[in-house]
Structure formats: C-alpha cells, structure tokens
Image (tube, coloured by chain):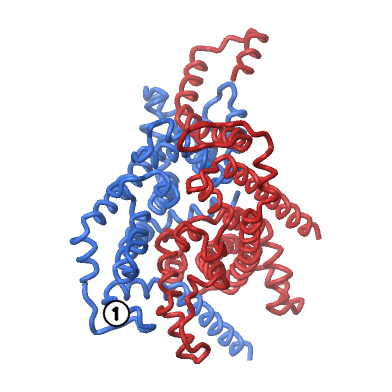
C-alpha cells in the first residue's frame, strides 16, 4: 500500500517535471527548428518541429549575404570580454579593500555602495545618456563598457569572500618577501578563482544580453551589438523574415548556453550567493 | 573622507608607515569602482532630480527652470495614467503568479529525481537568453500565422488566427505570459537551493503527526522559505515595474497598439528621446517610478516580515 503510494507520487512528480521542462523547452526547439526551415513553412500555422526541407540556407544567408551580422557577433563578443575582464579587476580590488584593509572612511564607502545599489536602473537612463554625451562617448564602444565597469553586487560578493579568506596565507607570502600588491595579484586573486569565475559568468551574461544601452548609445549600424542587430531583422521591410530572425536568435543564444554548460557549477554558486542576501 | 582626516588631526594620531601604505593601497584599489559608481549612479541621481525641475530641449541643449510644472503635468496627464496603470497591472498579475508557481514547482521538485542535470539546464534556458531574442521568439509564436494560433485553430477554439501583436486586448497579456514563463525557472532554482538545507526531520516529524502533503507544504515548506520569498518578491517587483526591453521590442518602441504596452519605462524613453523632446518631464516620471518601487519594496518587506511572526 505504502509502496504503491510512493510510486504514484513519483510518477506524478515526473509528469509535472516533464510538463514544466517541455513548456520551457518548446519555444527554444521551435526557434531552432524554424531557423532551418524556409519561410513559407513556418508561417502557415504548422507546429511540427520537423520538416523535409530543412537546410542551412538561413544561416548561410545571415553570415554570408549580410556582412553586418558577423560584425555584430564580434562586437558583442569583444564588448562582453573586455567588459568582464575590467569588471573582474575593479570589483575584486574593491571587495578586497573593503574586507582586508583598514583605512579611514571604510564604513562610509561601504554604506555609500549599499545605498547606490538600491537605485532602480531605469532612473539612470536619462542622466547616463547626457553624461555619456558630454564625455563624447556616444556611438563608441566605451559607452557600453565604462559605465558598466564596476558592479556593486559583485563587489559585495567579493567582500564576503575575502572576509572568510584565511589570513595566514597572506602572512606566509609576506614572510616570503612579497609586497602588498604582489600578495594581492599573485596570491589572493589566483586563490579566489572560483568566486571570480562566478562573478565573470554573470557579468559576461549581462554584457552579452544587454539591450537598452546599445539601443540608446549606438547610432552606426556597424557598431551594433547582437541584441540590437537582431531587431533590425524584424523591423526592416514590410514582412518580418522570421526564418532569418530565428537563425540569428539561435546564434545569440548558443554562446551563453555553451558557457552555462562549461561553468555550470559557478552558476549555482551565484544563485546561492544571491539567495543568502 | 575629510571627516576622518579632521578626526586624525584632533587626536593627533600619527599613522605608521605600514598603515599609510595600507591606506594608499585601499584608496588606489577603490578608486575605479568609486569613480564609476559615483558618476553613473550617484551623480546621475542628483542630475535626474535637477532635470525634473527643468524644461529640457535635447537638440538645443537648453535647460529652463520651470519649478514643479513637470510634477503637476505628471499628475494630470492622461498618458501618464495609462502608463502607470499598465505597469501596475503588469506587476500585480505577474508577481503573485510567478512567485506562487515557482514556490509550488520547487516544493514538488524537492525530492530525489533522475536527470537533475538535464532538467536544471533546460529550466535555466530562459534565464540565460537575452530579452531581445526571447521577445522575438514570442512575437513569432504569437503572430497571426504562428504556432499558437495553429494549435487553437486545430483544437477548434478559434476559426481564424488572432493578431495578438496588434490587438490592444492581447498585447500586454502576451508580454505578461512571456515574463511569467521566462522568470519562473529562475525563482524556482532559488527556492530549490534553499530547500536543500531544510532538515528532512521536520517533514518526518510532521508525518508522524499525520500531516498530508498539502499540510506539509503550508506549515513547513512555505514558512521555511519565507526569507527567500521576501527576496523573490522584491526582485520580482523591482523587475516588473521597470519592464522595458520586452515592451519596446514588442511595439517597436511605440508602446502600441493603442498605448496598451506603454509601460512607465517605455514612456520615459519615448518622452526623453522621441519626438516629444520632453526630457525634463521624462525625468519626473523616472523619479515617480523610483519612489513607487521603493514604497512597494518596503511594503512587501514589511508584510512578509509581520506574517512570519506567527
């Protein structure tokens, strides 16, 4: 009796789980399948994921005929990579200072950061635009990188990490003759690799997926990022070329999924960290 | 910082060379982050407040002080009312549904299952994907000849395809659906991570007392997850009230059809950068949105805290 109950419960669990997974997965499968089909087959209300006429034509088109798409891909990749590297150094240095070093004004700076993190992002849309315009950074890649070169959430995360970081490691290094800067860059940063990876993964994802900022700041089509370029496929001409849009969308999703699969464990750490706030 | 220097002067304490070196390192390490956050967040907040008391001409770059006129306009303007109504409706529908469903699914999934890795990856997909790509996928699925209409026609619910994208009755609802669909997995993952630490003995004790699954859910799982629920509610409220990308892409920046997808954020964008050229007014709307977000965040924190006293 008891065993039967468990089995029913277990199968119910799997049914719910599979349903949720399918509901989540279907739009993505549909996107991928549509990206391989000719336009007339995907705009006739057909829901099936397979067709006899599947080909790489849409991909060949977006990468070949329009030279903009590869450029956007490279732009997104470069901005995200450079932005992430800068962030790692800026945030880790700040987090380290706020936990391991003693200096006048330490608490004030920490509370200032805690206050600034509460400001909703959309409030900053207008003033940031005007400041970037004043600095002459409009339509430049730096407009997407510099304002986002520090991340308060990550600073707090790094601070938390260094608070619990054993002091003897640093002391041992200092006995070996390493200066304070050498200790940070040669000992602390390498030892903080797991938490830095977590930070990097989330920051890279943020840069890669950012839409509002490139939309506001980038005016020249060749300087667009992938998220912004994607929109030109759908707004150009009379009808939307859905088959090409879906191929382009698939290309934007793939790098992040690859990163997720490689750095899976770091994503979970990030989730936990978030949760403990 | 001048403050602490004064204090040093009063106490006449002289820092050792080593301490001074530490200060130098600390300030050096903090300079980039302080510089960036104070310009692009701190200064920006002051700037937006300044702008809200001015009439701004973006093209001529003139700032004319007009006192509280922008605020009067915001409280009497009918478009503003529509935008706030849309934003609040969006938030009021999306936040409870996504929080509740995320909690229930997490509770259901909190048991030993096979293929955890597969499900985890699958459920994380919407979190990984940019709103830019997600919105296009949904626009495609909900287009007149898309698969959603295809299913409904096949099931005999409708005869001809509905144009969800151009119908004011549906457009905001499609965005709501998309938002709920795309954020549930993330919040569910947060809940699941917390549930890993819930001691199994609590459930066992409840079972001995004869509690069924539903009772266990309401008397053990829900109270245990309360702190996480506060966090989820806050993130969700802040996120939904600021919704911009999805509405922008959906309506191509117009907030249409018939202002049905005009959120406050989109209105801020339209009035600041569009043909209206009313950046000062848009700044006022931004401040009102920020105040609304802070008030609702405080309320949700308070409500959830007082309940946990039971």
Provide residue A212's location: percent of width, then percent of height: 45, 50
Q: Give me the chain letter of mark 1.
A: A
Judging from the image, what secondary structure is the residue with disc 1 in? helix
Q: Please give the residue where the numbered disc 1 appears in the rendered image.
A: A40
Kindly identify the residue that appears in the image at 41 percent across and 66 percent down. B136
Looking at the image, which is closer to me, A40 or A97?
A: A40
- Which residue in the rendered view is the most extreme toward the right? B310
Count of labels shown?
Answer: 1
Q: Is residue A138 above or below residue A246?
A: above
Q: Is residue A167 above or below residue A13?
A: above
Determine whether, in the image, residue B68 is placed left or right of residue A94.
right
Provide residue A184's location: percent of width, then percent of height: 41, 30
The image quadrant that residue A263 belongs to is bottom left
Kindly identify the residue that appears in the image at 61 percent across and 29 percent down. A107
Check the picture and name the quadrant holding the N terminus of chain A. Answer: bottom right
Residue B45 seen in render: no
Q: Is residue B46 above or below residue B295?
A: above
10 Å crowding of disc 1: few (<14), some (14-19), many (20+): few
Q: Is residue B256 above or below residue A130?
A: below
The chain coloured red in the image: B
The image quadrant that residue A110 belongs to is top right
Looking at the image, which is closer to me, B234 or B174?
A: B174
Kindly identify the residue that appears in the image at 39 percent across and 34 percent down. A187
Kindly identify the residue that appears in the image at 18 percent across and 61 percent down. A64
Residue B19 seen in render: yes
Q: Colour of chain A?
A: blue
Provide residue A149's location: percent of width, then percent of height: 42, 38
Looking at the image, which is closer to me, A247 or B279?
A: B279
């Amino acid at each position: 009796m008891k065993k039967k109950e468990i089995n029913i419960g277990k199968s119910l669990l799997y049914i719910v789980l599979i349903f949720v997974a399918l509901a989540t997965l279907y739009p993505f499968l549909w996107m991928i399948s549509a990206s391989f089909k000719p336009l007339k087959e995907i705009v006739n209300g057909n829901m099936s994921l397979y067709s006899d006429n599947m080909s790489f034509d849409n991909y060949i088109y977006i990468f070949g005929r329009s030279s903009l798409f590869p450029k956007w891909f490279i732009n997104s990749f470069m901005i995200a990579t450079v932005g992430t590297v800068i962030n790692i150094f800026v945030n880790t240095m700040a987090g380290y200072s706020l936990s391991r070093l003693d200096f006048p004004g330490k608490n004030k700076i920490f509370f200032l950061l805690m206050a600034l993190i509460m400001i909703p992002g959309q409030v900053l849309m207008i003033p940031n635009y005007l400041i970037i315009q004043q600095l002459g950074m409009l339509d430049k890649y730096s407009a997407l990188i510099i304002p986002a070169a520090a991340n308060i959430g990550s600073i707090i995360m790094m601070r938390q990490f260094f608070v619990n970081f054993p002091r003897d490691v640093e002391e041992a290094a200092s006995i070996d003759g390493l200066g304070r800067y050498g200790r940070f860059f040669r000992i602390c940063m390498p030892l903080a690799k797991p938490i830095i990876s977590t930070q990097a993964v989330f920051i890279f994802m943020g840069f890669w997926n950012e839409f509002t900022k490139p939309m506001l700041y980038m005016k020249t089509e060749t300087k667009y990022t992938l998220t912004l370029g994607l929109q030109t496929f759908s707004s150009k001409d009379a009808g939307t070329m859905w088959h090409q849009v879906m191929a382009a969308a698939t290309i934007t999703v793939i790098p992040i999924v690859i990163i997720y699969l490689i750095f899976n464990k770091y994503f979970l750490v990030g989730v936990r960290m978030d949760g403990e706030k | 910082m001048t403050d602490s220097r004064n204090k040093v002067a009063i106490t006449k304490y002289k820092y050792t060379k080593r301490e001074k070196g530490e200060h130098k390192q600390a300030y050096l390490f903090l300079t980039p982050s302080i510089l960036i956050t104070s310009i692009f967040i701190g200064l920006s907040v002051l700037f937006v407040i300044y702008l809200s008391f001015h009439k701004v001409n973006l093209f001529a770059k003139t700032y004319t002080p007009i006192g509280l006129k922008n605020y009067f306009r915001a409280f009497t303007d009918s478009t503003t009312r529509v935008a706030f109504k849309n934003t609040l409706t969006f938030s009021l529908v999306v936040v409870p549904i996504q929080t509740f469903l995320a909690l229930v699914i997490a509770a259901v999934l909190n048991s030993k299952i096979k293929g955890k890795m597969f499900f985890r990856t699958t459920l994380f997909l919407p979190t990984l994907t940019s709103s830019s790509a997600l919105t296009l996928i949904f626009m495609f699925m909900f287009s007149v000849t898309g698969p959603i209409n295809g299913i409904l026609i096949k099931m005999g619910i409708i005869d001809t395809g509905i144009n969800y994208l151009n119908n004011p009755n549906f457009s905001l609802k499609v965005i709501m659906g998309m938002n709920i669909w795309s954020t549930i997995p993330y919040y569910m993952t947060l809940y699941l991570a917390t549930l890993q630490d819930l001691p199994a003995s609590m459930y066992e004790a409840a079972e001995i007392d004869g509690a069924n699954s539903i009772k266990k859910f309401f008397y053990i799982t829900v109270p245990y997850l309360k702190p996480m629920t506060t966090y989820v509610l806050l993130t969700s409220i802040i996120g939904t009230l600021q919704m911009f990308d999805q509405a922008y892409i959906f309506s191509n920046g117009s907030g249409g059809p018939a202002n049905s997808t005009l959120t406050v954020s989109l209105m801020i964008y339209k009035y600041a950068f569009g043909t209206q050229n009313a950046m000062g007014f848009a700044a006022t709307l931004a401040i009102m949105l920020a105040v609304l977000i802070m008030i609702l965040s405080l309320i949700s924190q308070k409500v959830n805290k007082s309940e946990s006293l039971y």
